[in-house]
Amino acid sequence: MRVTNKANRLLLLGILLVSTLATKADVKYLISLQGQEFEMGNLLEWSTLKEVNSSYFFIEKSVNGIDFEQIGKVDASGKMEGETAYHFLDIGADQKKSFYRLKEIEKDGSYSFSHTVLINKQFS
């Protein structure tokens, strides 16, 4: 995958290295969640079909797949219909294994989790 800016300068170049762990995915209308390793960090990308009452997404990370901590926040679009794409770059991620998941926060304060994505580090 190549990520470029508006001037078509290469920002990221990497390969897709994703394992999806078998856990219950509760985030409503989540179409996809995937992660990719790049030399400068791990890129998470996800998309939703619609976002009824969605407020924002917390990005959570773990080194053991059990104990997660919040590393970022992305505001939800709140679109009632239509697909919305999101991304988050975990700059400087240097763990051999990184587990990621999304925590979707609703406007009423309730929340749900996505499935977990594992990125195995290949770059040294």
Image: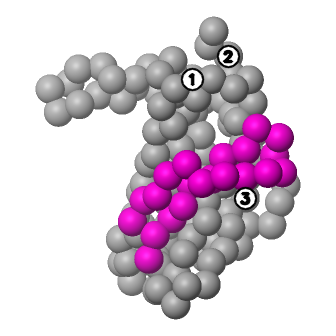
Q: Quick one: label 2 or label 1, which is nearer the N terminus?
A: 1
Q: For this view, does 123 lie left or right of residue 50? A: right
Q: Are marks 3 and 2 in contact (CB under 8 Å)?
A: no
In-front residue for pair 49/96 = 96
Task: Determine the residue positioned at 46% across, 58% down.
Answer: 73
Few, some or many residues within 10 Å of mark 1 (<14, 14–19, 20+) = few
Can you say whether 27 is above or below 35 in the image?
A: below
Task: Determine the residue positioned at 38% across, 78% down.
Answer: 78
Q: What residue type is disc 1 on?
A: Ile
Query: Magenta segment: does it hold 61?
Result: yes
Q: What residue type is disc 2 on?
A: Gln
Report the coloring of the rendering: one colour
Q: Position of residue 53 (x, y in %)?
A: 46, 86
Please tell me the numbered disc located at residue 115.
3
Q: Are marks 2 and 1 in contact (CB under 8 Å)?
A: yes
Between label 1 and label 3, give the one nearer the viewer: 3
Residue range (magenta): 55-75
Residue 29 makes an appearance in the image: no
Residue beneath label 1, please? Answer: 15
Residue 114 makes an appearance in the image: yes
Residue beneath label 2, please? Answer: 122
In-front residue for pair 51/94 = 94
Between label 2 and label 1, give the one nearer the viewer: 2
Q: Position of residue 89 (x, y in %)?
A: 46, 39
Query: Magenta segment: does it hold 110?
Result: no
